[in-house]
């Protein structure tokens, strides 16, 4: 009997252990299932949060991209397109040019700003002497030269068989000959601020780069407006601009340089000279004008020290007060109608009116321009 009870007790204990194990396993299984569900819910919530954040981040960028794409589409040129160049000639461009020749340093500089330098197959003479090419488009220096306005290589230019040739107004006869050979040619003459903008419009339309040109014109316009606003009411300083050849050469009132001085809050003393080219004057005339400042052209070979040491100018107010400066020429001659010409006014405003335009402000504008349109840092040239 005792043996039977022992066996029965052992069976009961075994059954209890099995039941406990089953219950524990069931409990653990339920806990694991609940943990998995909870973890899944957490992950789902995180994914949803990430997606919502991504939507918040990307939505404005997407809208901006759509706007940019829309503007670019509106500015797209449909060929064939007819343009009127700055000689008044109508030129029909049948298709977007893939190869370009520029026989003028101003149009060459513009082609770089429009991001077209990779399409150039020919360039004006002495390209190696222009710092802007070395800084922004070194490959241009090694391109075939088509000469200059004084010594144009018509045969060499024609041999390049470019889709479009851009020449200065002085080469009107050469343009006519190239057209007879079936080579599309446009003439440019950016001798004033308005003509510079017109040239930008002509070349950008011919080359399907209107969108880029609008950015360039916007930069120019915004800084013109800035100067006009800040210098409103400021006393205009009398400025004598000394030319490249010597101190007795200056700009006539129809030249780009006079516009540059006016925008910078100055008054060119040579405004009374009705001419569109450089003119010669004498010392007596400069002394009679008695300018507050003398500014030497960027590419002049003489120096500020030469002018300050010139005894014939000792009585001139600008010399007596040490107000003689030379236009910078590290990248380009800003006293010429190049795309960067607005920088000449910005720089000069800082000289004439340092209380209104600080040197730091003008430096920042100059840096922004070259980084945006020429892709190099002016301060690290």
Image (spheres, helix red, strand yellow):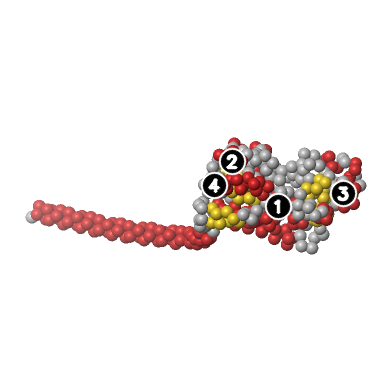
Determine the CA span between mark 3 and mark 4.
51 Å
Which mark lies nearer to you, 4 or 2?
A: 4
Q: Is residue 21 above or below residue 141?
A: below
Q: Secondary structure at mark 3?
A: helix
* Quadrant including the N terminus: bottom left
Going from N to C along the chain, the mark reached first, 1 or 2, is 2
Q: Quadrant of the C terminus?
A: top right
- State which tag comes first along the sequence, 4 or 2: 2
Please identify the residue farthest to the left as the structure is shown: 1
Residue on which disc 2 sits: 157
Looking at the rendering, which quadrant does residue 307 occupy? top right
Q: Is residue 43 above or below residue 106?
A: below
Mark 2 surroundings within 10 Å by alpha-carbon count, few (fewer than 14), some (14 through 19), many (20 or more): many
Label 1 vs label 4, nearer the camera: 4
Instruction: Measure the C-alpha gap from mark 3 to mark 1.
Output: 24 Å
Please tell me which of labels 1 and 4 falls first in the chain.
4
Residue at 51% across / 53% down in the picture?
94
Q: Earlier in the sequence, mark 3 or mark 4?
A: 4
Residue bearing the label numbered 3: 286
């Amino acid at each position: 009997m005792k043996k039977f009870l022992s066996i029965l007790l052992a069976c009961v204990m075994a059954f209890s252990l099995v039941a406990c194990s089953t219950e524990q396993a069931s409990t653990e299984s339920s806990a694991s299932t609940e943990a998995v569900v909870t973890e899944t819910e957490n992950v789902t919530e995180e994914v949803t949060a990430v997606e919502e954040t991504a939507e918040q981040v990307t939505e404005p960028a997407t809208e901006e991209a759509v706007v940019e794409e829309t503007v670019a589409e509106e500015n797209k040129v449909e060929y064939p397109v007819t343009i009127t160049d700055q000689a008044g000639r109508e030129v029909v461009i049948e298709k977007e040019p893939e190869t370009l020749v520029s026989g003028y340093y101003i149009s060459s500089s513009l082609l770089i700003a429009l991001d077209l330098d990779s399409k150039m197959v020919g360039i004006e003479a002495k390209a190696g002497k222009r710092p802007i090419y070395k800084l922004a488009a070194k490959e241009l220096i090694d391109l075939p030269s088509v000469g200059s306005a004084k010594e144009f290589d018509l045969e060499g230019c024609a041999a390049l068989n470019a889709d479009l040739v851009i020449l200065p107004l002085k080469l009107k006869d050469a343009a006519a000959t190239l057209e007879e050979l079936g080579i599309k040619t446009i003439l440019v003459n950016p001798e004033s601020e308005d003509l510079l903008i017109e040239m930008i419009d002509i070349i950008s339309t011919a080359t399907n780069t209107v969108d880029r040109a609008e950015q360039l014109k916007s930069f120019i316009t915004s800084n013109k407006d800035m100067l006009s606003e800040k210098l409103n009411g400021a006393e205009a300083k009398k400025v004598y601009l000394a030319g490249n050849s010597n101190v007795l050469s200056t700009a006539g009132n129809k030249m780009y340089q006079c516009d540059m001085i006016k925008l910078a809050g100055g008054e060119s003393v040579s405004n009374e000279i009705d001419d569109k080219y450089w003119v010669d004057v004498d010392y007596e005339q400069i002394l009679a004008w008695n300018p507050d400042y003398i500014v030497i052209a960027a590419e002049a070979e003489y120096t500020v020290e030469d002018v300050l040491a010139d005894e014939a100018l000792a009585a001139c107010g600008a010399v007596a007060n040490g107000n003689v400066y030379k236009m910078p020429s590290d990248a380009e001659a800003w006293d010429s109608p190049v795309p960067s010409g607005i920088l000449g006014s910005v720089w000069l405003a800082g000289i004439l009116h340092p209380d209104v335009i600080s040197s730091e402000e003008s430096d920042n504008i100059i840096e922004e321009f070259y980084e945006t349109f020429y892709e190099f840092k002016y301060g690290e040239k």
